Amino acid sequence: MFYRLYSKLFFIILSLLIIGSCISELQKPEKADLVLMNGKIVTVDDAKPEVQALAVSGDRIIAVGSNDEIRSYIAEKTEVIDMEGNLAIPGFIDGHGHFTSLGRSKMVLNFMEVKDWDEVVAMTKEAVKKAKPGEWIFGRGWHQEKWDKTPEPNVDGLPFHHTLSKVSPDNPALFSHASGHASFANAKAMELAGISKDTQDPPGGEIVKDSEGNPIGAFRETAQRLLRRASSRYLENRTPEEVRAEQLRGIELAVEECLSNGVTSFHDAGSSFETIDLFRKLAEEGKLGMRLWVMIRDSNERLKERLSEYKIIGNGKNHLTVRAIKRSLDGALGPHGAWLLKPYEDLPSSTGLNTSTVDSVKETAQIAIEDDFQLCVHAIGDRANQETLNIFEGAFKAHPDKKNLRWRIEHSQHLHPDDIPRFGQLGVVASMQGIHCTSDAPYVIKRLGQKRAEEGAYVWQKLMKSGAIICNGTDVPVEYIDPIACFHATVTRKLKDGTIFYPDQRMSREEALRSYTLNCAYAAFQEDILGSLTPGKLADITVLSKDIMSVPDDEILDTEIVFTIVGGKVRYKK
């Protein structure tokens, strides 16, 4: 009997030891592929807002906590990054930009920093020396409101083409405004486009002319298409191999620019089906390098034909998502293209330009809601924003079963006071760009007058109080993609001369960071995988040289990107 009792006791103890060993093994933390330690990590997660370290396995975050808590995740092959006290945040998400245009902007003349029209002419003269006869010269980034002096002669501050045509008599020149909502051409480009004194303005556009009716070379909004048709004929002479090589090079340059600026995910504000096909191929081959969330920009006819094939969610390990449609109702404030309820203060003959008919956008809204796509409408002026809200509200009422649609107004810059609460009431996302506020501010009051500017220009706090979600970005290449400069503009609204543009509408640093991370993820239906450093989410992380959450305002601009991490892989290192 004693032997049987001893045997039973032995097996019970042995079983308990085995079970205990198994439990111990189960309780051991998963080993990490990457660990970040010794930093200040702002997670944008209310459950654990600030930690010292985090661990990544594969492309996901598996733990956040103190150095001691995360140290147990380190194995022999774990890559350990000592942040040396630097700040880590969720990877910046640029909530509105033009991806392929960003790439192309690196391959043409850059006029973003020119001080006057004479510099544009001088740069063109140098480009002509290197160009082949008849070769088109392209550029972008000029902005007459940011020049040190007004060119003479001019119309609304816009120069005449004659000095440009003199230095480039045989090479057509076509230069996009910084906003993308106007272009300037020399005589040769206008000749090839068949533009003369008799050419009429197209709907939604304007050929700027002098007092005698002669085109000066400036083209607003849809009038730019007259020039682009001519340049397209020139570009059609390239071989398919040349076209593809240029496209791939542009994408490569755009990815490099994003990663070097700490941007891990990018909301592309309008690409064609054909461009999306290229994105999809690169994503599936693991060659995209960062995450793209893309709005389709095409005609209603093509949308009806092809939309069902292009609902793409998380393609290529969450590197490509396509679930939105892009339309535009007006232009930009700089070239007097924003569509206003009342005339411009400095151009009383104009209320801006309506670039697409309201009925055509209504039709797009019907297509979007029936196919479960988000609709994103470019609207800058108060009239364009009001019309867009009306379109959205009409679509929502006609489909009461459709909820949580997260339709977006891209820019939402100048609003009538009565329309501000409608964003929150309708659940419309305000996709705004902090850097536009400080960039445009020097001429906003000139365009709108003091009252309209104060009531409705870049009213971030008013929108947030309405319950609206604001997602931030740069509208690159309209502005530089630099999220540090945009963050600074968002929290200070400080202009180059030291003045502050309606300071009561500034965001706090916490609000600004959320607008650049979790809010952008929400605006893309991606808050379950992006936007905060939460276990289970994708390991997209930006490490900064300065603590932008606490340093003095002016020191924010000195911040550099130390690391950019996408899916647990270091894609950029300073």
Image (spheres, helix red, strand yellow):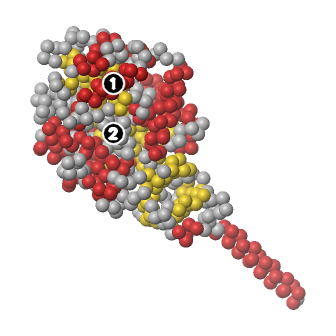
Residue 477, horizontal then vertical, whole percent: 36, 36
Please tell me whether mark 2 or mark 1 is closer to you in this view: 1
Residue 462, horizontal then vertical, whole percent: 23, 51
Query: Residue at 12% across / 33% down in the picture?
Result: 346
Label drawn at residue 527: none
Label drawn at residue 479: 2
Residue type at the position of mark 1: Thr
Query: Residue at 74% across / 77% down in the picture?
Result: 16
In the rendered image, which quarter is residue 167 located in?
top left
Residue 188, horizontal then vertical, whole percent: 31, 14
Whether residue 430 appears in this view of the structure is no
Q: Secondary structure at mark 2?
A: loop
Q: Nearer the viewer, residue 63 or 133?
A: 133
Decide: is 188 above or below 321.
Answer: above
Residue holding disc 1: 124
Return the disc, 2 or 1, that comes first in the chain's sequence: 1
Decide: is 442 above or below 230.
Answer: below
Residue type at the position of mark 2: Glu
Q: Secondary structure at mark 1?
A: helix
Total numbered labels: 2
